[in-house]
Amino acid sequence: MASRSPLITVMTRAAIKASRGLKRDFGEVENLQVSRKGPADFVSTADLKADKTLREELGNARPEYGFLTEEGAEVKGTDEHGRRWIVDPLDGTTNFLHGLPHFAVSIALEERGELVAAVVYDPIKDEMFTAEKGAGAFLNDRRIRVSGRSALNSALIGTGAPFLGHGDRPIFLKEVDAITASTAGIRRMGSAALDLAYVAAGRFDGFWERELSPWDIAAGVLLVRESGGQVTTIKGTAFKLDGDSILAANLELHPSLVKALRAARDS
Ligand code: IPD
Ligand code: CA
Ligand code: CA
Ligand code: CA
């Protein structure tokens, strides 16, 4: 069992504190106020409370760091190393609001544009995924690694769908058809942060999605890198946090997935 560094301790404590409110509100949707931010993007009072708790906890521990969170205003920090928190207080809001026990709190720390620490916490399964740059990735303090699976036809792949009316939807549906036919299966679980954590833990062999925001994936990207996986765009080019697609997989499967997705788009 690995011991947690002071930084990871700050992050896991904040995630646990925010999760207490989420667990209380889970299954009590009739007591929450819910509004729609986009065609398939809901926000509830549970998201907002968790956002506030995380800002308070992380802000008290590291007052000089900036913030980029899904539900609050961006805050420029005063830190001389350009550090900022990238936070999704509740990743998987739709699952949460439907009583589906699959959602997470996601916290990443960026330093001068580079991801340096990550926490993704699933409070229902009590699974705490953590990573620090150069120090590996962990699940409940035990080292995790991406899967060793190299045959595409035995791989399990996570994904997420662009909403109805999105320009990339027809292409995505072609990709789903091709990946379903050439792998052991696809899962659409509804939390990008956990999808990436599952790649890191070797539960998924790969994951691809479009149009995610930095807070959905910042922590998950570091988890995958620190567990020995590769993160690029769907085309296989250099990944950018504010880019328009992500493909994560173990090193052996990554090229096969780039190829299979390209062939599907060209078909
Ligand atoms: C969503 C989840 C979902 C993904 C959506 C995200 P939210 O985040 O990560 O898996 O497909 O695009 O917006 O809104 O539940 O925090
Ligand atoms: Ca959202
Ligand atoms: Ca999210
Ligand atoms: Ca969210």
Image (cartoon, grey):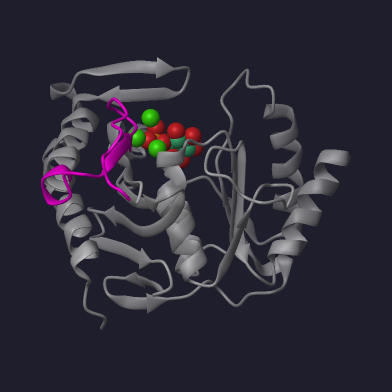
- In this view, which residue lies farthest toward the bottom? 1
Query: Total marks drawn?
Result: 0
State the image coordinates of residue 95 (x, y, percent, origin top left): 35, 37
> Residue at image x 19%, y 42%?
54
| In front of the other: 227 or 149 | 227
State the image coordinates of residue 265 (x, y, percent, origin top left): 81, 40
> Residue at image x 64%, y 65%?
155
Q: Is residue 220 left or right of residue 67?
A: right
Q: Can residue 64 be seen in this view?
A: yes
State the image coordinates of residue 197 (x, y, percent, origin top left): 43, 59
The quarter in which the C terminus is drawn is top right
| In front of the other: 7 or 40 | 7
- In this view, which residue lies farthest toward the right? 267
- Ligand 2 lies in quarter: top left
The quarter in which the N terminus is drawn is bottom left
Q: Is residue 190 visible?
A: no
Q: Is residue 84 left or right of residue 162?
A: left
Image quarter of residue 44: top left
State the image coordinates of residue 157 (x, y, percent, origin top left): 60, 56
> Residue at image x 22%, y 35%?
51
Q: Is residue 174 magenta?
A: no
Q: Is residue 117 above or below residue 213?
A: below
> Residue at image x 47%, y 69%?
226
Q: Main secondary structure of the magenta part?
A: loop
Magenta-colored span: 59-80
Q: Is residue 220 above or below residue 93?
A: below
Q: Does the magenta stretch include residue 63?
A: yes
